[in-house]
Image: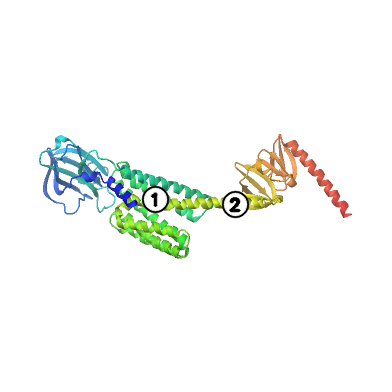
Amino acid sequence: MLRFLLTAIFLIALAPPAFAQELSWQTCHGTTGQAGPVLRDCRPVEDFIDPQGRELWVRSAVEVPADARPRAFYIAGVASSEVWLNGRRLGDNGRPGATPQTEVPGRYQAIFPIPDTAWQPGKNMLVVHLSSFHGGLHFARPMSAMGVWPYPFPQPAALLALTFVAAGTLLAAAFGFGVIHAMRRTGSSLILAAMAGVATLQAVVESLRMLFDYAYPLHAWRMSAIWVLAAAFAILLVAYVTARFLPRARGLMIGLALGLVGATALLSGFDAKTVWALTIGVMLAVVPTVAGVRSRIPGARPALAWLVLFLVLAFDSPEWLADLSYFLLAAGLVLPLLMVEVVRLGRDDREREAALTRAASRPDRLTVASARGVELIPIAEILAVVGADDYVELRLAGGRTLLHSARLDGLIAELPSSFLRIHRSVIANLAQVQRLEREGDRWRLHLREGAPLPVSRSRQPALREALEVSTFLGGIDAAAGNSTSQ
């Protein structure tokens, strides 16, 4: 089913070239005259048209269209161009020149509509003036398309839509793993977030050609970015599966991935670089995954099936891998892993809540949920509780502070009667009070250590009364202690 879907999408994407004429090109020496191009010394193009680092004139004989549909000359490649049909100028894309200074770079893709009146009976002579001095890199195949097609032709909307669906899915996975990493600080979630993010960026960069016409010098940057992102995904994949299924060989496998995947930069052709970077990464990832299957580690079998499917598509249809299959396969890997992580996160939260419930039965201690986990804090060590948005700050004996995921309103019910709310954002332990002082119009409560606490005017009478009762009860306890000692 997947093969059928990919085949249909690929044919839709290539629908316009199916109507193009097969052109046989000649390269010539040429100049621009008053009546159009003047060509001489023409000879057949033996391999492919390559205007990189030079000015080039090419021509081809074109048949008159068999139907009345409008036609256009379509060109895609790293070159500026100017086009004539039967001596009639169809337009230019930038401005070709004999030197870098005289050339004005054009767009990577250009369409030149052909007026019906430009056609002549029999053979028609198509002439293209090219130059490419600003490509930045040397491309193995600088011109990806040059032909006469029906105009306007349909855009590969299905391919673009599926690519963006995959990109959106991968972006959501990257965000999800990023949230999990922020909560749990696990290395695996960080690697998976990076894998999903890298695949998302590559899907966007891969689609730039279909989204807008960029200047041809940018093509080198785009193709380089595609290869770099593919290599990064391959290395991250090896790091993830090795850490999961064969952790003792993690350093060796990552070193091999860096060396072998990095070596694909030496290959000719960016499509080959990209496909081999991904393929080598997947092949290396198979080794620790097979070890995981032999050790019966959970998740190893599905991961191995995914890697095998990736390799089958890579060797059977490499042209599909970079265009579409890679994004679908990447999404098919990270989404199930994200669901597993979410389920595990929910299970851990339920276990944590159960631990908090069990610990709450100990009245001499306060169960504190912090970023580090769950702590049991002796209530006698708490000097004060200060509100901090959705959290509270516990000020403890010895100058230590601790954030607790609770609110003052709920916390006052858990603390014993020796704690009193003295301000809308402060609860004080009266057993730790040293003195109550007035500073101008304000009152401050001094504890045995730490900074003084503010006392609101409305709560000051209740605090005074509580302190008097506490002093009175303390005196009774002291007298009772003396009487017993006698």
In the displayed structure, would residue 256 be above or below residue 67?
below
Q: Which of these two is toward me, 146 or 459?
A: 146
Which residue lies at the image location 87% right of the left edge and 54% below the top edge? Answer: 485
Residue 335 at x, y percent in the picture: 44, 50
Q: Amino acid at mark 2?
A: Arg
Q: Amino acid at mark 1?
A: Ala
Q: Which color scheme did the rendering employ for the protein?
A: rainbow
Q: Which of these two is toward me, 100 or 63?
A: 63
Q: Which mark is residue 199?
A: 1
Position of 313 compared to 180: left or right? left
Q: Which residue is mark 2?
A: 352
The secondary structure type at the circle numbered 2 is: helix
Q: Nearer the viewer, mark 2 or mark 1?
A: 2
Q: Crowding at label 2, few (<14), some or many (≥20) Cα neighbours within 10 Å? A: some
Position of 338 compared to 80: left or right? right
Q: Which of these two is toward me, 307 or 398?
A: 307
Position of 224 compared to 469: left or right? left
Tell me if residue 419 can be seen.
yes
Residue 423 at x, y percent in the picture: 68, 38
The image quarter in which residue 147 lies: top left
Q: Quadrant of the C terminus?
A: bottom right
Residue 157 at x, y percent in the picture: 31, 42
Q: Which mark is residue 356?
A: none
